[in-house]
Amino acid sequence: MADWQEITGGITAPRGYQAAGITAGLKPSGLPDLALIFSEVEAIAAGVFTTSQVKAACVEYCRQRLQAKQSARAILCNAGQANAATGTQGYLDTLESAMAVGQALNISSESVLVASTGVIGQRIKMDALRSGIPKVVAALSQTGSDAAAGAIITTDLVTKSIALETTISDRPVRIGGIAKGSGMIHPNMATMLAFVTCDAVVSPHLWQQMLARAADRSFNSITVDGDTSTNDSLIALANGQSRTPAITEWGAEAEKLEAMLTAVCQHLAKAIARDGEGATCLIEVEVTGAHDEISARQIAKTIAGSSLVKSAIFGRDPNWGRIAAAAGRAGVPFEQENLQIKLGDFLMLENGQPLQFDRAAASAYLKKAVAGAYLQQDTVLISVNVGNGHGSGKAWGCDLSYDYVRINAEYTT
């Protein structure tokens, strides 16, 4: 049993946070496109960003800010233009955005982090942003999480939000989060953005370490299409407003906080994978028996990212051979005679040998997942064992449908 409970409120569930989302005129669609998250006090800040060599201006800006000062009070996110591959002017636009937020909130611009999402190669529409910032500041509220979650999405079909609560030193501690992402999703951060708020008191170096590990077990373990974005950003704030004793070293309380942070990130990551462009179901791959967790996750990510596996799931074809082939090319050594593969409850391969199974029933299992409740019964489970090691890991993806090609063929047109 998890040592926490789900609560309402998203990113404004933790104490001392406000959020807002408005329509500023950045998206051609006229949908909400500007979000702001605000901590009422200075908060410890941590971040994990894209590993791409082509990085958006906001990524470079946030990295520099967090290297200089591991704290922040505000996160501004625009949707519509990625402001990636926009040169010096794109970076200047990001600086101006932070300065404008700082002025509107009467705080230092150095306490403002910035994220962007949208079409690569397009600068932010600065006239719309300039006029939108006072409006989004005026809209800040302690119930603004849903509005913020709706203002950061692009091709997403649904918003992604979660909040959890636990007890530390007999006081409630909360973590909330929102995220966006549907396509251009692949391990090593993927076009995804995620923002997390927490009201615990935790030291900067611990908070950064916790977030990095949580990212590896969540956002770096999902894949939709094998493409890593220029804008991927995971930013987490911890403002200490729970008034619990400071967590400054590893121990039971630090482990509990990290476990809850990981659970928040995994929920958001799975929601992104399930919302993959054109997807009809979520795929969860669990690998056991590997030498260590990193090896297990590598095999799991390779299977979840295989276009052939994803296509077979979309076609409701229990083609375990594609799973075996993906596991074999993951770059992790194991003995073929130890390989075991299950699809749901159907055991298909044991000790490297194929088994008889009911193909019609296995196909029906795949069809049932498509009709299942969102993020509950809509998950196809693939279980793979590769030996007797203690390493285990999970990865998540989605099936590959005809609509993925349609959506991305028409993205800028």
Image (cartoon, helix red, strand yellow):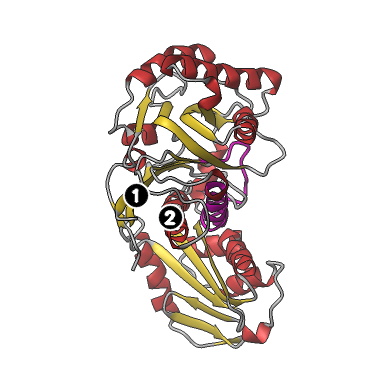
**Any magenta on residue 231?**
yes
The amino acid type of the residue labelled 1 equals Val
Instruction: Name the image quarter holding the N terminus.
Output: bottom left
Please give the range of residues in magenta: 207-235
The amino acid type of the residue labelled 2 equals Leu
- Residue 131: give x, y in percent of width and height: 44, 12
Q: Residue at x 56, y 24 (%)?
A: 110
Q: Report, in whole angstroms, how far the alpha carbon at label 2 lies from the one at label 1.
A: 9 Å
How many neighbours does mark 2 have within 10 angstroms: few (below 14), some (14-19), or many (20 or more)?
A: many
Look at the picture and state if 108 lies above or below 291: above
Q: Is residue 385 left or right of 22 when viewed as pictured?
A: right
Residue located farthest toward the front when viewing the structure as drawn? 245
Q: Residue at x 42, y 72 (%)?
A: 363
The residue to which callout 1 is attached is: 173
Q: Is residue 292 left or right of 6 when viewed as pictured?
A: right
Q: Residue at x 65, y 31 (%)?
A: 64
Helix, strand or loop at label 1? It is strand
Disc number for residue 257: 2
Residue 191 visible in image:
no
Tell me whether the residue at label 2 lies in contact with that at label 1, contact meaning CB atoms closer than 8 angstroms.
yes
Disc number for residue 327: none
